[in-house]
Amino acid sequence: MIITPRVRGFICLTAHPQGCEQNVVNQINYVKSKGSVEGPKKVLVIGASTGFGLASRITSAFGANAATIGVYFEKPSAEGKPGSPGWYNTAAFEKHAHEAGLYAKSINGDAFSDEIKQKTLDLIKTDLGQVDLVIYSLASPRRVHPKTGVVHNSVLKPIGQTFSNKTVDFHTGNVSEVSITPASEEDIENTVAVMGGEDWAMWMDALKAADLLAPGATTVAYSYIGPGLTEAVYRKGTIGRAKDHLEATAFTITDSLKDLNGKAYVSVNKALVTQASSAIPVIPLYISLLYKVMKAKGIHEGTIEQIQRLFQERLFAGADVPVDEKGRIRIDDWEMREDVQAEVAALWEQATTETLPEIGDLQGYRTDFFNLFGFEVEGVEYGTDVNEVVEVPGLV
């Protein structure tokens, strides 16, 4: 079938298999171009099919020559119905990993559930014995708690008072004022339940109890801080409260891994276009201005550049892993440079519907958004028939 983008708000309802594959190939080629990483050899990636999780799997496999198991929750393709982008990403990754002689298998299902955890433990035990790196990169708006059965839904809201500021509709370029009402205590609790560290700790406890963590095993989860411009709706909002919990959980996990000489880290990454970030008011405008500034300075990075640098220059550089005063790895260091933030703040004051095409990089934002779904990728013929039915070679 001929697959075209069908967009509803900040979601694209279709994905293109060849575009997704080309995206994955581009990331693989980037990692290969940067040389080998003296890193992990057996890796579990929880949330492995898009964004930072996918980049972590690619970097592990093609940078460190690692065997990888990926866990994700994606919609398979069927005749006349394209799969989700993460489905096509994983199919492409595993195809190229297998061609390179690398072990790569996947489990598709709800990573919050006990069932999927057990299925993953069984696969590790049978095929790998133990893992030496666990990446936790789940991004979900909803969690069914495996012990209580309670359904928790996260929200993106400020805490304490209504927040008003500029935002942009990245499809039209229209800059407008947005106001977001504050969260309730229940909103905060639910967001922490979905996006905090409880599930990460559950995974690590289960892996350790089953003796599936190698001595010196490392685990990493991903977070974001951002500038003062976005903190009311992000770092000081409900999602920030969840990230606080995630970051505190790293210390709890490290304590639990002491007998293995293991360590848990949170890596604070830079702002990038994701399905999640597209949904947060204010963030698309901030990112379009940030892209303009960082590209002009030659320091812009996408997900694969961020994660490759994290692996090669931080996690597996051979020395102690550098962290900030709260124990976090700061791979957002280029975004948060004083000169970068000063320029973005100045542009923010000037940003209107009329000025944004000149002072921002809205086109770069849009391109990255469509790339998430396999569209507008260089070298892909979009007007031709493609087979929408694609199998994931290592699906268990």
Image: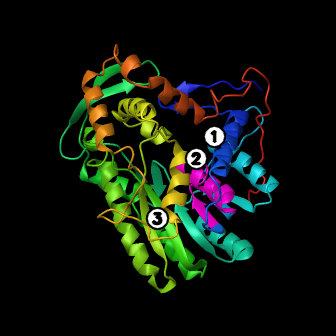
User: Residue at point 37% right, 72% down?
Assistant: 251
Q: Which kind of residue does numbered mark 1 sit on? A: Pro
Circle 1 packing at 10 Å, graded few (<14), some (14-19), many (20+), is: many
Numbered label attached to residue 199: 3
Numbered label attached to residue 57: none
Pick whichever of labels 2 and 3 is earlier in the sequence: 2
Q: How far from the left and from the top, in percent, is residue 122?
A: 68, 73
Instruction: Give the labeled residue for mark 1.
Output: 85
User: Residue at point 25% right, 42% down?
Assistant: 228
44 is within the stretch colored magenta: yes
Q: Which kind of residue does numbered mark 3 sit on? A: Asp
Looking at the rendering, the stretch of residues picked out in magenta corresponds to 43-65
Q: Which kind of residue does numbered mark 2 sit on? A: Thr
Relative to 346, 278 lies left or right: right
Image marks 2 and 1: residues in contact by CB distance under 8 Å: yes
In this rendering, the answer to whether 342 lies above or below 46 is above
In this rendering, the answer to whether 353 lies above or below 199 is above
Quadrant including the N terminus: top right
